[in-house]
Image (tube, helix red, strand yellow):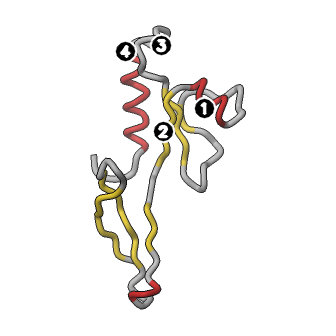
Amino acid sequence: MANKRVETGRGRKPGVVKTSKQSSTSNRAFFLLIGIIAVLGIGAYRTAFADPVAAVGPQVPTLGGTRVWVLPNPSGLNAHYPRQRLVEEFARLRAAVPGPP
């Protein structure tokens, strides 16, 4: 399999596409690879995934085989998460993301 960088989505963010060199051009398979899905807001995650005891950080269940990570919402209304703790949680996620820094 060969990797190549492509522009994807409305925001034109870079992604990685894997292409199969063994198949013909008309039968070539493409897969967009996403390492981690981040959900902002523990309340949003608990509601969306019906998991009332979920905590900030990596989650055990995956979403379509992709790891899920819950982050505190950085909104100014989230006063119980001081800035330093927000920075630490976002840094923990960044450290877990595969690929170049």
For marks 4 and 2, give the one nearer the viewer.
2
Q: Position of residue 58 (x, y in %)?
A: 55, 38
Distance from Cα at disc 4 to Cα at disc 3: 10 Å
Contact between marks 3 and 2 (CB within 8 A): the answer is: no
Helix or strand or loop: what does disc 1 sit on? helix
Distance from Cα at disc 4 to Cα at disc 2: 18 Å
Which amino acid, mark 4?
Arg
Quarter placement of the N terminus: bottom left
Q: Give the crowd class for mark 4: few <14, some 14-19, many >=20 residues within 10 Å.
A: few
Contact between marks 4 and 2 (CB within 8 A): the answer is: no
Q: Which residue is mark 4?
A: 83
Quarter placement of the C terminus: top left
Residue 78: mark: 3
Distance from Cα at disc 1 to Cα at disc 2: 10 Å
Distance from Cα at disc 1 to Cα at disc 4: 21 Å
Q: In the rendered view, would you say 60 is above or below 87? A: below
Q: Outermost residue, front direction?
A: 10
User: Could you tell which of marks 1 and 3 lies nearer the N-terminus?
Assistant: 1
Q: Which residue is mark 1?
A: 45
Taking the spot 39% from the left edge, 76% from the top edge, the residue there is: 19
Which amino acid, mark 1?
Tyr
Distance from Cα at disc 3 to Cα at disc 2: 17 Å
Disc count in the image?
4
Q: Outermost residue, top direction?
A: 79
Q: Which residue is mark 2?
A: 38
Taking the spot 59% from the left edge, 28% from the top edge, the residue there is: 44
User: Could you tell which of marks 4 and 3 lies nearer the N-terminus?
Assistant: 3
Distance from Cα at disc 1 to Cα at disc 3: 15 Å
Contact between marks 4 and 3 (CB within 8 A): the answer is: no
Q: In the rendered view, would you say 74 is above or below 66? A: above
Q: Position of residue 69 (x, y in %)?
A: 52, 38
For marks 4 and 3, give the one nearer the viewer.
3
